[in-house]
Image (tube, rainbow, N blue to C red):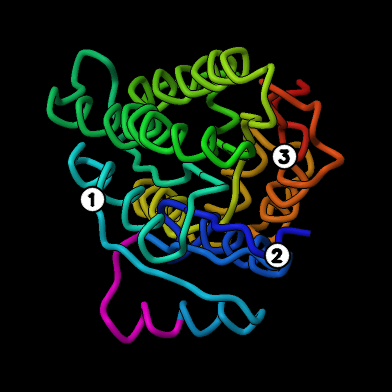
Protein backbone atom coordinates (compact mmCIF):
# COMPACT_ATOMS: atom_id res chain seq x y z
CA UNK A 1 0.00 0.00 0.00
CA UNK A 2 2.82 2.43 0.83
CA UNK A 3 5.56 0.98 -1.35
CA UNK A 4 7.95 3.69 -2.42
CA UNK A 5 6.75 6.18 0.19
CA UNK A 6 9.09 7.70 2.77
CA UNK A 7 7.88 8.05 6.35
CA UNK A 8 9.40 10.13 9.14
CA UNK A 9 8.36 9.02 12.64
CA UNK A 10 9.63 11.06 15.58
CA UNK A 11 10.33 9.28 18.86
CA UNK A 12 10.36 5.94 17.06
CA UNK A 13 13.11 3.95 18.78
CA UNK A 14 10.66 2.49 21.30
CA UNK A 15 7.02 2.39 22.39
CA UNK A 16 4.25 3.86 20.26
CA UNK A 17 6.61 5.37 17.70
CA UNK A 18 8.31 2.04 17.04
CA UNK A 19 4.92 0.35 16.72
CA UNK A 20 3.93 2.93 14.10
CA UNK A 21 7.27 2.62 12.27
CA UNK A 22 6.85 -1.15 12.02
CA UNK A 23 3.26 -0.85 10.81
CA UNK A 24 4.23 1.60 8.06
CA UNK A 25 7.19 -0.58 7.06
CA UNK A 26 4.86 -3.59 6.83
CA UNK A 27 2.94 -1.61 4.20
CA UNK A 28 6.13 -0.97 2.23
CA UNK A 29 7.18 2.49 3.44
CA UNK A 30 10.83 3.32 3.98
CA UNK A 31 11.22 4.81 7.45
CA UNK A 32 13.35 7.54 8.99
CA UNK A 33 13.69 6.65 12.65
CA UNK A 34 14.34 9.17 15.38
CA UNK A 35 14.97 8.94 19.09
CA UNK A 36 17.49 8.23 21.77
CA UNK A 37 19.40 5.03 22.51
CA UNK A 38 22.88 3.55 22.36
CA UNK A 39 24.34 2.40 19.05
CA UNK A 40 23.58 -1.29 19.59
CA UNK A 41 19.96 -0.61 20.52
CA UNK A 42 19.46 1.64 17.49
CA UNK A 43 21.05 -0.96 15.21
CA UNK A 44 18.62 -3.59 16.52
CA UNK A 45 15.62 -1.30 15.98
CA UNK A 46 16.70 -0.61 12.42
CA UNK A 47 17.17 -4.30 11.74
CA UNK A 48 13.71 -5.07 13.12
CA UNK A 49 12.06 -2.45 10.90
CA UNK A 50 14.12 -3.43 7.85
CA UNK A 51 12.88 -7.02 8.25
CA UNK A 52 9.81 -5.86 6.31
CA UNK A 53 12.05 -5.38 3.28
CA UNK A 54 12.32 -1.61 3.49
CA UNK A 55 15.12 0.90 3.95
CA UNK A 56 15.63 2.92 7.11
CA UNK A 57 17.46 6.05 8.11
CA UNK A 58 18.17 7.29 11.60
CA UNK A 59 18.64 10.66 13.26
CA UNK A 60 19.20 11.47 16.93
CA UNK A 61 17.62 14.91 16.40
CA UNK A 62 16.48 16.46 19.69
CA UNK A 63 12.88 17.68 19.45
CA UNK A 64 13.60 20.31 22.09
CA UNK A 65 15.84 22.11 19.57
CA UNK A 66 14.11 23.83 16.63
CA UNK A 67 17.20 23.57 14.43
CA UNK A 68 17.29 19.81 15.01
CA UNK A 69 13.63 19.46 14.01
CA UNK A 70 14.19 21.21 10.67
CA UNK A 71 17.39 19.22 10.09
CA UNK A 72 15.51 15.97 10.74
CA UNK A 73 13.05 16.65 7.92
CA UNK A 74 15.88 17.49 5.55
CA UNK A 75 17.78 14.35 6.60
CA UNK A 76 14.72 12.26 5.72
CA UNK A 77 14.57 13.84 2.26
CA UNK A 78 18.30 13.36 1.73
CA UNK A 79 18.45 9.74 2.91
CA UNK A 80 15.09 8.41 1.74
CA UNK A 81 14.35 10.77 -1.14
CA UNK A 82 11.20 12.38 0.27
CA UNK A 83 9.02 12.93 3.31
CA UNK A 84 5.64 11.61 2.19
CA UNK A 85 4.42 10.67 5.66
CA UNK A 86 5.13 12.61 8.84
CA UNK A 87 4.19 11.10 12.19
CA UNK A 88 4.70 13.45 15.14
CA UNK A 89 5.01 11.11 18.08
CA UNK A 90 7.87 12.29 20.30
CA UNK A 91 6.69 13.38 23.73
CA UNK A 92 7.62 13.87 27.37
CA UNK A 93 5.68 14.26 30.59
CA UNK A 94 6.06 16.19 33.83
CA UNK A 95 3.59 15.96 36.70
CA UNK A 96 3.06 18.77 39.23
CA UNK A 97 0.27 21.06 40.33
CA UNK A 98 0.08 24.37 38.46
CA UNK A 99 1.36 26.49 41.36
CA UNK A 100 4.34 24.16 41.76
CA UNK A 101 5.04 23.50 38.07
CA UNK A 102 8.65 24.43 37.16
CA UNK A 103 8.80 27.00 34.38
CA UNK A 104 11.58 25.16 32.57
CA UNK A 105 9.56 21.94 32.65
CA UNK A 106 6.56 23.75 31.17
CA UNK A 107 8.68 25.14 28.33
CA UNK A 108 10.22 21.75 27.57
CA UNK A 109 6.90 19.87 27.55
CA UNK A 110 5.30 22.48 25.27
CA UNK A 111 8.29 22.52 22.92
CA UNK A 112 8.58 18.76 22.49
CA UNK A 113 4.88 17.85 22.56
CA UNK A 114 3.49 20.76 20.55
CA UNK A 115 5.92 23.28 19.10
CA UNK A 116 8.16 20.65 17.51
CA UNK A 117 5.08 19.27 15.72
CA UNK A 118 4.36 22.69 14.23
CA UNK A 119 8.02 23.00 13.25
CA UNK A 120 8.18 19.58 11.57
CA UNK A 121 4.89 20.12 9.72
CA UNK A 122 6.09 23.55 8.56
CA UNK A 123 9.27 21.97 7.22
CA UNK A 124 7.62 18.91 5.64
CA UNK A 125 4.64 20.54 3.89
CA UNK A 126 6.62 22.09 1.02
CA UNK A 127 8.03 18.65 0.16
CA UNK A 128 4.58 17.05 0.27
CA UNK A 129 3.09 19.82 -1.89
CA UNK A 130 5.87 19.37 -4.44
CA UNK A 131 5.08 15.64 -4.72
CA UNK A 132 1.32 16.20 -4.66
CA UNK A 133 0.60 13.79 -1.80
CA UNK A 134 1.16 13.56 1.93
CA UNK A 135 -0.02 12.19 5.22
CA UNK A 136 0.48 13.90 8.57
CA UNK A 137 -0.44 11.93 11.68
CA UNK A 138 -0.11 13.65 15.03
CA UNK A 139 -0.01 11.38 18.06
CA UNK A 140 -1.96 13.42 20.59
CA UNK A 141 -3.52 11.73 23.62
CA UNK A 142 -6.74 11.19 25.53
CA UNK A 143 -5.36 14.27 27.27
CA UNK A 144 -5.88 16.14 24.02
CA UNK A 145 -9.61 15.72 24.64
CA UNK A 146 -9.97 15.63 28.43
CA UNK A 147 -7.83 16.72 31.38
CA UNK A 148 -6.21 15.23 34.47
CA UNK A 149 -4.94 17.08 37.52
CA UNK A 150 -1.20 17.59 37.72
CA UNK A 151 -0.62 17.49 33.97
CA UNK A 152 -1.17 21.11 32.93
CA UNK A 153 1.64 21.35 30.38
CA UNK A 154 0.93 17.96 28.82
CA UNK A 155 -2.82 18.59 28.60
CA UNK A 156 -2.27 22.07 27.16
CA UNK A 157 0.19 20.72 24.60
CA UNK A 158 -2.03 17.83 23.52
CA UNK A 159 -5.15 20.02 23.29
CA UNK A 160 -3.04 22.38 21.20
CA UNK A 161 -1.94 19.50 18.96
CA UNK A 162 -5.55 18.53 18.29
CA UNK A 163 -6.24 22.15 17.34
CA UNK A 164 -3.14 22.33 15.14
CA UNK A 165 -4.29 19.15 13.40
CA UNK A 166 -7.58 20.80 12.44
CA UNK A 167 -5.89 23.93 11.11
CA UNK A 168 -3.43 21.97 8.95
CA UNK A 169 -6.30 19.81 7.66
CA UNK A 170 -8.23 22.91 6.60
CA UNK A 171 -5.22 24.50 4.96
CA UNK A 172 -4.55 21.33 2.92
CA UNK A 173 -8.20 20.38 2.32
CA UNK A 174 -8.11 21.01 -1.43
CA UNK A 175 -5.01 18.85 -1.89
CA UNK A 176 -4.06 15.18 -1.55
CA UNK A 177 -2.40 15.95 1.80
CA UNK A 178 -4.30 14.97 4.94
CA UNK A 179 -3.71 15.65 8.62
CA UNK A 180 -5.30 13.72 11.47
CA UNK A 181 -4.63 12.92 15.12
CA UNK A 182 -4.56 9.72 17.14
CA UNK A 183 -5.51 10.05 20.81
CA UNK A 184 -4.25 7.04 22.78
CA UNK A 185 -5.23 6.36 26.36
CA UNK A 186 -2.95 4.28 28.55
CA UNK A 187 -0.35 2.43 26.51
CA UNK A 188 2.36 0.49 28.31
CA UNK A 189 5.36 2.49 27.10
CA UNK A 190 8.54 3.49 28.98
CA UNK A 191 6.87 6.87 29.73
CA UNK A 192 3.83 5.20 31.31
CA UNK A 193 5.99 2.66 33.12
CA UNK A 194 7.67 5.56 34.93
CA UNK A 195 4.26 6.74 36.13
CA UNK A 196 3.41 3.22 37.30
CA UNK A 197 6.70 2.97 39.18
CA UNK A 198 6.12 6.38 40.78
CA UNK A 199 2.61 5.40 41.85
CA UNK A 200 3.85 2.13 43.33
CA UNK A 201 6.57 3.91 45.28
CA UNK A 202 4.27 6.68 46.48
CA UNK A 203 1.62 4.26 47.74
CA UNK A 204 3.91 1.43 48.78
CA UNK A 205 2.18 -1.09 46.52
CA UNK A 206 3.36 -3.62 43.96
CA UNK A 207 3.89 -2.77 40.32
CA UNK A 208 0.97 -5.00 39.35
CA UNK A 209 -1.31 -3.24 41.83
CA UNK A 210 -0.17 0.15 40.55
CA UNK A 211 -0.95 -0.89 36.96
CA UNK A 212 -4.43 -2.03 37.96
CA UNK A 213 -5.08 1.20 39.84
CA UNK A 214 -3.88 3.35 36.96
CA UNK A 215 -6.12 1.56 34.47
CA UNK A 216 -9.19 1.39 36.68
CA UNK A 217 -9.05 5.13 37.33
CA UNK A 218 -9.35 6.10 33.66
CA UNK A 219 -9.70 3.20 31.21
CA UNK A 220 -12.96 1.20 31.50
CA UNK A 221 -11.59 -1.74 29.48
CA UNK A 222 -8.93 -2.19 32.19
CA UNK A 223 -6.53 -3.13 29.41
CA UNK A 224 -3.64 -1.17 27.92
CA UNK A 225 -3.81 -0.23 24.25
CA UNK A 226 -0.77 -1.53 22.37
CA UNK A 227 1.78 0.13 20.07
CA UNK A 228 0.73 -2.39 17.41
CA UNK A 229 -2.90 -1.26 17.58
CA UNK A 230 -1.90 2.38 17.28
CA UNK A 231 0.42 1.48 14.41
CA UNK A 232 -2.47 -0.21 12.63
CA UNK A 233 -4.59 2.93 12.96
CA UNK A 234 -1.74 5.12 11.68
CA UNK A 235 -1.28 2.84 8.66
CA UNK A 236 -5.01 3.06 7.92
CA UNK A 237 -4.85 6.87 8.02
CA UNK A 238 -2.14 6.66 5.34
CA UNK A 239 -4.29 4.44 3.10
CA UNK A 240 -6.56 5.44 0.19
CA UNK A 241 -9.55 4.57 2.38
CA UNK A 242 -8.65 7.60 4.51
CA UNK A 243 -8.41 10.09 1.64
CA UNK A 244 -11.38 12.08 2.95
CA UNK A 245 -10.58 11.78 6.65
CA UNK A 246 -9.28 15.24 7.46
CA UNK A 247 -8.82 17.02 10.76
CA UNK A 248 -10.22 14.12 12.78
CA UNK A 249 -9.08 12.82 16.16
CA UNK A 250 -9.30 9.09 16.78
CA UNK A 251 -9.52 7.78 20.33
CA UNK A 252 -7.93 4.44 21.09
CA UNK A 253 -8.37 4.50 24.84
CA UNK A 254 -10.45 1.57 26.08
CA UNK A 255 -13.45 3.86 26.61
CA UNK A 256 -11.65 6.57 28.62
CA UNK A 257 -13.11 9.55 26.76
CA UNK A 258 -16.51 7.89 26.28
CA UNK A 259 -17.26 8.44 29.97
Pointers 2 and 1 in contact (C-beta within 8 Å): no
Q: Which residue is mark 3?
A: 252
Q: Answer left or right for 109 relative to 232.
A: left
Q: CA distance from mark 2 to mark 3?
A: 26 Å
Q: Which residue is mark 1?
A: 62
Which is in the foreground here, disc 2 or disc 1? 2
> How would you rate the neighbour count of disc 1 (Cα within 10 Å): few for under 14, some for 14-19, many for 20 or more?
some
Local secondary structure at mark 3 = strand
Residue at 35% across, 54% down: 201
Query: In front here: 42 or 169?
Result: 169
Q: Answer left or right for 57 relative to 53.
A: left
Pointers 3 and 1 in contact (C-beta within 8 Å): no
Magenta stretch, residue numbers: 35-44
Q: CA distance from mark 2 to mark 1?
A: 28 Å
Local secondary structure at mark 1 = loop
Local secondary structure at mark 2 = loop
Q: Quadrant of residue 165?
A: top right
Image coordinates for residue 166, horizontal then vertical, percent: 59, 16
Residue 3: mark in rendering: 2
Image coordinates for residue 256, horizontal then vertical, percent: 70, 30
Residue at 35% across, 60% down: 78
Q: Is residue 226 above or below residue 67?
A: below
Given the current orientation, which residue lies at the most extreme right position? Answer: 241
Predominant SS along the magenta part: helix
Amino acid sequence: MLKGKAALVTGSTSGIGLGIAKALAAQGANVMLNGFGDADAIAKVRKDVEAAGVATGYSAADMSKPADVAALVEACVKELGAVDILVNNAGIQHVANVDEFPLDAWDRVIQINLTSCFQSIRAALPHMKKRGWGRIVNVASAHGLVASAGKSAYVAAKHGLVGLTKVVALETAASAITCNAICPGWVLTPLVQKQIDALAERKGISGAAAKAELLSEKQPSKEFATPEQIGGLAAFLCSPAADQIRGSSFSIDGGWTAQ
